[in-house]
Image (cartoon, grey):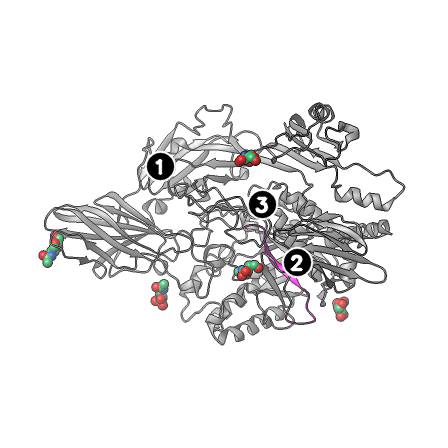
Amino acid sequence: MMRRVLKEFLIVSFLVAAAATVAFGVNVTYDHRALVIDGKRRVLVSGSIHYPRSTPDMWPGLIQKSKEGGLDVIETYVFWNLHEPVKNQYDFEGRKDLVKFVKLVADAGLYVHLRIGPYVCAEWNYGGFPLWLHFIPGIVLRTDNEPYKAEMKRFTAKIVGMMKDENLYASQGGPIILSQIENEYGNIDKDYGPAAQTYIKWAASMATSLDTGVPWVMCQQKDAPDPIIDTCNGFYCDGYTPNSKNKPTMWTENWTGWFLSYGGAVPYRPVEDIAFAVARFYQRGGTFQNYYMYHGGTNFGRSTGGPFIATSYDYDAPLDEYGAPRQPKWGHLKELHSAIKLCEDALVATDPTSTSLGNNLEAGVYKTSSTCAAFLANYDTKNDATVTFNGNSYHLPAWSVSILPDCKNVVFNTAKINSVSTVRRFVGANVGNQLTSSNEISSDWSYVSEPIGISSNNAFKRRGLVEQINTTADQSDYLWYSIRANIDGDESKSVLHVKSLGHVLHLFVNGELAGSAIGNANNPTVSKDIPITLKPGINKLDLLSLTVGLRNYGAFFDTTGAGVTGPVELEGLKNGSTIDLSSMRWTYQIGLKGEGLGLDTGGSTLWVSGVPKSQPLTWYKTNFDAPSGDNPIAIDLSGMGKGEMWVNGQSIGRYWPAYLAPNSGCSDCSYKGPYSSSKCLKGCGKPSQKLYHVPRSWLKPSGNIMVLFEEIGGDPTQISFTTQVLQSLCSQVSESHPSPTESWSQDKSTRKRKQDPKVSLECPHPNQVISSIKFASFGTPQGQCGNFTHGKCKSDNALSILQNACIGLKTCSVGVSTSTFGDPCVGVVKSLAVEASCE
Ligand SMILES: *[C@@H]1O[C@H](CO)[C@@H](O)[C@H](O)[C@H]1NC(C)=O
Ligand SMILES: *[C@@H]1O[C@H](CO)[C@@H](O)[C@H](O)[C@H]1NC(C)=O
Ligand SMILES: *[C@@H]1O[C@H](CO)[C@@H](O)[C@H](O)[C@H]1NC(C)=O
Ligand SMILES: *[C@@H]1O[C@H](CO)[C@@H](O)[C@H](O)[C@H]1NC(C)=O
Ligand SMILES: CC(=O)N[C@H]1CO[C@H](CO)[C@@H](O)[C@@H]1O
C-alpha cells in the first residue's frame, strides 16, 4: 500500500511541476486547510531568494538548487526604491530584472510568491521605500493618508500590471500563485492609532481590486480583512491560527538564521532546530511555510538598511551567500521535505488530531479511512524519551519530531542528521597566472586624497545644525558640517562634546582626524567627548557625518533622522567656559568631491601613482586580473578600515573590517530549546565581515578596475583575493539509524533482505572526482566534518576500504555494517565517519 502512495505522490508532483510550465491558467483558491490549486489542496514548501541580492547569472543555479532541495515555491519581495529611484523613472535592468527572475522560476517548474509590499522591511535601505516619498507634501507613510495611498496604489498596480502583461499569474498560466500586500504591519499598527485599521482595510480592497486571480496574504496582520489570508512570521509558528475558519495556516517567514550587523558577531541557527520548527508547523495543521532566507546573498551598493546591516546577507541560509549548498543544512532540510511530501495525501485529507504521549510529548495524526500520517514530537528541551504509539515503541531525542507517513515507520527525525556535510573555505587565489607570494592583488596603485572639509561649490551655509536625511535625501552617505572657531590662547586640553542621531561621525581639527564616534545596530545615536588641541587664532573644525543604511523597521521609522543634531560644544577651555557651537553658522556639503567626479568608476585625471597607508579619506585605484578558475570570489579586506569598494564601476558594498564583534556572547549553542537571534553566535572579537563577494560576472579576465574609498585609514597592499573551495566532503552514518529511504524500502518489501545503511559521497562540482580520503573510521568516531577523531573502538581497515571504493570516482557508496568492516567492539552501536576531498 505504501508503494502505491509513493508512486501516486511521484506522479502527482510530476504533473504539478509540468503544469507550472504549461501556459494554461490554473485556479488558485484556498480553504481552511490549504491553498487549493485546480481543485486540489496542496502542501507547499517555499523559500526566499531576493533577486537583487545575487546576479542574473547566479539565478538559474540558485533556483535549480532550491528545486533539488525540495522547494515548490520561490518567494521574493519587490524593492520599490530599486525600481523607481526617481519618481516615474523605472529601472528593471540587470539585477533588477524581476520579470526575468519570475520567468526563470517558472522555467524550473516552481511557483512564485510575489511579496509586493511595497513596504518590505528586509534589512533593506528605508524598508524599500524610495526616499522621494518622504518629500511629498503632507505625506505620512504606512497609514490612512491620501498622498501615501496614491503612491502605494500606483506602484502596486504598476507591478501587478507588469506581471499580467507577461502572463505571469497562475490564473494566466504563469507561476505566481500568491501575492502579499503590506508587511508585518500588525507588529506596529497600534502606534498609528485608529487610522491603522482604515488603512489596512483600504490596502486589502486596493489589492483585491487589482484582480490578479490569485490569493493575497498579509503577514503578522491578525485583522487582515477577507479574503486576505493572515500569515505568521517567526522562528516557530506551530501555535498560529488564522483569523477565520475559512483560511489556511501559512508561515511566510521562518527565519533560517539571522542577519549580520556591523559591530555584531555572526548569527547561525542549527538545522536540527529549523527542522524541528518546520515539522511542528506541519504537525499542527500548517500546509505552507517559507524559509526566510533560503538564499540570503549580498547587499550590493548602498542597499542595506538597519542601520548598520552588513554587506553580507548570508543569513546562515541553506544556500550560502555565494550560492553553494550549506551542508548539512541544505541536505537535512531536503530530507525533511521529502518526508513531509510523503504525508501530503493525509495532510490535505483532514484536520490533525493531537494527543499527549506524556510530559512534553505529543502526537499529531492525520487519519482518514484510506490514509494516515503521524508526527511524534518531543518538545522537552533536555530529555530524550521513548513513547508508545499505535502499539509500537519509538525513541524521540529531546527537541525533535519523528515523521511517520504511514503512522508506523519513521522516515525522518529532525535531530538525526544523515545528510553529507561539507567544509567550504576561502583560500588565497591565483591572480592571473601566478600566486603572488604575499597575495598582493597588484603592485600598481594610484590614489586621490579626498579634501577634508568643504571643497565643492554646491556647499551652503545655515545657522544651526541640520538633520542629515532631509538634507542629503540619501544621495550620499556623507554630509560635511564645517565651522571655524576663533581661539584666544593655546588650548591643548580642550574637548569637543558632540551629539548625533548617528550613525557615524569623524572629526577633523585643522585637517587632522581627531576622533570618531560610532553607533551600533541597537543604538545608532552617538554622544562623545573627543579630546582636541586648538591653536591660537582660527581653527577649522570639520565633522563628517555618515549614514550606514537607513532604518527599515518600526513605527514611523522613516522619520527617525540622522546626523549631527547637537549639541556641539567646546569644553575644557582654560578659562573654564563652554562654547556652544550648535546655533552658530555652519557650512554644509552633501557628499564627497570624489563622488561628484566619478572616481568610483576609476575615471578622472586626478589619480597619482602611489599607495599611502593609514591615511584617512583616500581613494585608491588599481588594475587587476581575475582570479583563475570558476570558484566564487571573495576579496579579503583585512587591513582596510571603513568605506565602499567598486569593481568595474559596480559597487561591492560598504566594507568595514575595522568594526569588530564584541569579545563575548559566542559560546557553544545547543539546538535544543527555543532559538533566539542572539542564542548562537560565532566570530566574537573578529571583524563582523572581512570577506566581500565579488561576482564573477562583473569581471573580465584582465584589466579590471578596482576602486576603494577609505574613510579612516587602511593599507590596500594587504588586500587579497580568495576563492571558495570545497575543502572536505563528509558523511557519518550509524549502523543503527537507517536513512529514510532504507527503512522505507524495508517496509515495502518484507521479503527483501534488510539493507545496510550506506555512506554515500558525491563531489558537487561536475568536473571533480574524489581525490583522497582524509579520514575514515568505523567504530565510535568523534568530532565533526574537518575535525573527526577515532574513538576507543575502531576497525583497522576503514581507510583502505574507503580508498579502494572511492578514489578517482565522482560518487561512491559503502555499506555501513560489520559484514564490510568486521566488528571491532561487539554489542556497541557503531558508525562510519568519512572525510574526503574532491579535485
Ligand atoms: C476556482 O475554484 C473555486 C473553488 O475551488 C470555484 O468556486 C471557482 O468556480 C473556480 N473558478 C474557475 C474560474 O474555475
Ligand atoms: C574663554 O576662551 C575662549 C577660547 O579662547 C574664548 O573664545 C572665550 O571668549 C573665553 N570666555 C571668556 C568668558 O573669557
Ligand atoms: C525633515 O523635514 C520635515 C519637513 O521640514 C520635518 O517635518 C521633519 O521633522 C524633518 N525630519 C527630521 C528627522 O528632522
Ligand atoms: C575540533 O574538535 C575539538 C574537540 O571536539 C574542538 O575543541 C575544536 O574547536 C574543533 N575544531 C574545529 C575546527 O571545529
Ligand atoms: C518580529 C517577530 O515576529 N518576531 C517574533 C519571531 O518569533 C519569535 C518566536 O516565535 C517571537 O518571539 C518574536 O516576537
Q: Which residues are magenta?
A: 243-257
Mark 2 residue type: Asn
Q: Quadrant of the C terminus?
A: top right
Q: Which residue is at a point 68% across and 36% down the rendered structure image? A: 732
Q: CA distance from mark 2 to mark 3?
A: 47 Å
Mark 1 residue type: Gly
Classify 10 Å Cα crowding around label 2: few (below 14), some (14-19), many (20 and above).
some
The residue at label 3 has a CB less than 8 Å from ligand 5: no
Mark 3 residue type: Pro
Q: Secondary structure at mark 1?
A: loop
Q: Position of residue 352 (x, y in %)?
A: 74, 63
Whether residue 148 is visible here, answered yes or no, is yes
- Ligand 4 is in which quadrant of the figure? top right
Nearer to us: label 1 or label 3 = 1
Q: Which residue is at a point 50% across and 39% down the rendered structure image? A: 694
Residue 838 lies in magenta, yes or no? no
Q: Earlier in the sequence, mark 2 or mark 1?
A: 2
Nearer to us: label 2 or label 1 = 2
Q: Secondary structure at mark 3?
A: loop
Q: Position of residue 3 (x, y in %)?
A: 85, 49
> On residue 56, which mark appears?
3
Q: Dot 2 corresponds to which residue?
A: 360
